[in-house]
Image (cartoon, grey):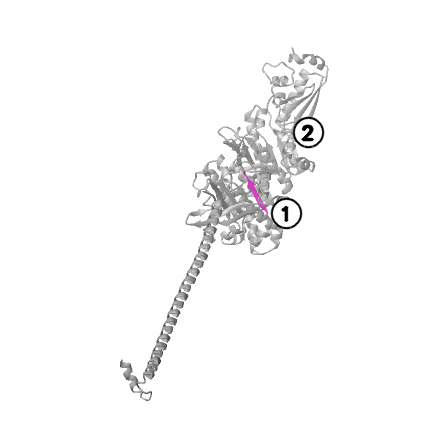
Amino acid sequence: MMYGAETTSSDSHETADQETWELRLYVAGQTAKSVAAKENLQRICDEHLPGRYQIEIIDLLEHPQLARGDQIVAIPTLVRKLPSPMRKIIGDLSNTEKTLVGLQLRATGSADR
Amino acid sequence: MTILRFVGRRSDSDARTIKNRIDNDASLETLMMHSLGNTLDARNIDGADHTNRALPKSPTGIPGLDEITGGGLPTGRPTLVCGTAGCGKTLLAVEFLVRGATQFDEPGVLLAFEETPEDLIKNVRSLGFDLDQLVAENRIVIDHVHVERSEIEEAGEYDLEGLFLRLNFAIESVGAKRVVIDTLETLFSGFTNEAILRAELRRLFAWLKERGVTAIITGERGEGQLTRQGLEEYVSDCVILLDHRVHDQISTRRIRIVKYRGAAHGANEYPFLINEDGISVLPITSLRLNHDASDERISSGVDRLDTMLGGEGYYRGSSVLISGTAGTGKSTLAAHLANATCRRGERCAYFAFEESPQQIIRNMRSIGLDLAQWVDRGLLHFHAARPTLYGLEMHLAVMHKIIDQLEPAVAIVDPITNFSTNATRAESHAMLMRLVDYLKTRGITALFTSLTAGGEALERTQAEVSSIVDTWILLRDIESGGERNRGLYVLKSRGMAHSNQIREFVLNENGIQLLDVYVGPEGVLTGSMRIAQEARERAQALEREQELSRRKQKSEQRRQAIEAQIAALKAQLLAEENEFELFLEDSQSRTSQLAALREQMAQSRKADAAEHPTKHSLHGEM
């Protein structure tokens, strides 16, 4: 149930279960949204991906050149680098349900494309 | 006036060096000429030069656009450029950046939402912009912002700080003074939270202003408003609307300054042109009649026509109309002017709307005009296009562009009539008036040909340009004796004593010849009728001559006859006199004989002695 994503990718998810998730969070300084996003991400990962995740936090105030590579427009943006395909979740991740859907950690009730 | 010739003769040197040279030459005339070229268009828009007042402006470098905006876009402020798809928004924005980087030393940032840098570079290369090179030289940065809706999930509060940071980074990396955002509205399809988006857009425009960059933001035209997402509400300084209109299957691009806070601007719609040199906008409605009038004359290329035009030809800078029915030799007259112009070493622009340049050159060769040599030497420039190729405004735009580049002494439009096929009469009239004005302000002699349709009054041109031209030459068919011949006369020519005669116009391998027509009791005769009439006159003259000699002979004969009669009578008189003499002698001799005889008888009778002479008288009584 927990990994019951779309049928087509269920096979890859079996193997992906064992992989380490690479997540990248783009923030801009210590704004309220940035701080909230970091906390929310930490909480969700601990809950759903215990021991199988890596979080890289990029502060675009310090490294603005990095925004281009991942096509960052909105802040904060969470990028799922691995497992592929790449997914993006924007916002402070306060909506846990939507975050899980975005990360494809939960089957979606509503169409997300 | 001398300057005009001077400019015209420097056929291959760069226009800029000529201008510099003129600057150094301090004569009043040259200064006038120089300022004429530079400020006239700006002044023509609303009659005032406002380039130095009000808001600071950043020139776009796009020909014409700086004139209608009175100097460029507002410096340090965002300008909204909106229009329908394919109207040239992106191109205008990119040209603004490229010209900024190359001409004004203002580096730029292009934030592209719709096209990838590769595509953009490819697209503008055809317009002569080497974006690649400018990027390599760090004078322009292209940042492609791609927002893929399908891979984004929105989970909570966010803002577009990422975009700001990227833009800021790009601006700082090259020290950009100019920014283009193309097309911002793409964001509306990337994010669902419109409230956040609108707040961020408002912040973006404020931020751009704060940064002091001169920016162009493009927006798609929407229903009932300027842009689909109402971007115009965020931009208060300058809004430019581009339009792409199709009328009678002919499209014309137009530009209009909808709003320009704090500056006077041309409010009209101006046509603009996209070609291999980018965009050019043409502020062509001139409201004033203040062009210089030259006293200099230039040859029409036909000696006898010059004679008809007060002996010296057309005025330089005047406009000439040659009208006539089909096949009367309008193009030929135009080609003669082109030939004469090039022979003086001046440049000539020939706008052909009916024939291809090759065809014109071939046809003129058949009457002994070698136009190809002038084309080779770069003095004669042909521009051939079908009138239906694009709209009137576009034609005008193309002509302006060519004239600006070539700086010709003479411009020929052959024919103007075709324009009315794809426009209303009023439109083509307005267009030609603008063209005439434009050429006059530049001191360029203009020659237009106009086809008069059969059945219409000859003294009428389709486009009704006759009132705006200075010299009007009418070519007409004179039909008589089963043939058509060409006649030429000068209908009007302002400011000169022109001939009122009709001349017969003959085309042969030596070009145009103007012959005196036969004007006699039987009317105007041309062609073989003229030749026949001349022969008839010669015969009559001969006849008269013969008659004269005949009469002379006759009178001589009569004289001789009378003289003979006189001689005969004289002879008769003489004979009669002789006869009388003889008779007189005879009678005298007879008398003396009688006397002698009587004496003899008397002696024989011895009646009277010879000693008695008194008796002699008695004998007489007997």
Name the residue carrying label 1.
B14
At label 2, the amino acid type is Leu
Q: Is residue B167 left or right of residue B251?
A: right
**Is residue B330 among what the camera can see?**
yes
Using the image, tell me which numbered label, if any, was put on residue A94. Answer: none
- Pick whichever, A13 or B440, lies toward us: B440
- Pick whichever, B608 or B231, lies toward us: B608
The number of numbered discs placed on residues in the rendered structure image is 2
Residue B233 horizontal/vertical position (percent): 52, 32
Task: Report the magenta stretch's main SS.
Answer: strand
Residue A92 horizontal/vertical position (percent): 62, 23
Q: Residue at x 67, y 15 (%)?
A: A48
Quarter of the rendering containing residue B591: bottom left
At label 1, the amino acid type is Asp
**Is residue B49 among what the camera can see?**
no
Residue B413 horizontal/vertical position (percent): 53, 42
Q: To which chain does the residue with label 1 belong?
A: B
The kind of secondary structure element at disc 1 is: loop
Location of residue B569 with respect to B103 vertically, above or below:
below
Q: To which chain does the residue with label 2 belong?
A: A
**Residue extending furthest toward the top:** A1
- Pick whichever, B468 or B362, lies toward us: B362
Residue B371 horizontal/vertical position (percent): 60, 44
Location of residue B421 with respect to B500 vertically, above or below:
above
Quarter of the rendering containing residue A22: top right
Q: What stretch is highlighted in magenta?
A: B347-353
The kind of secondary structure element at disc 2 is: helix
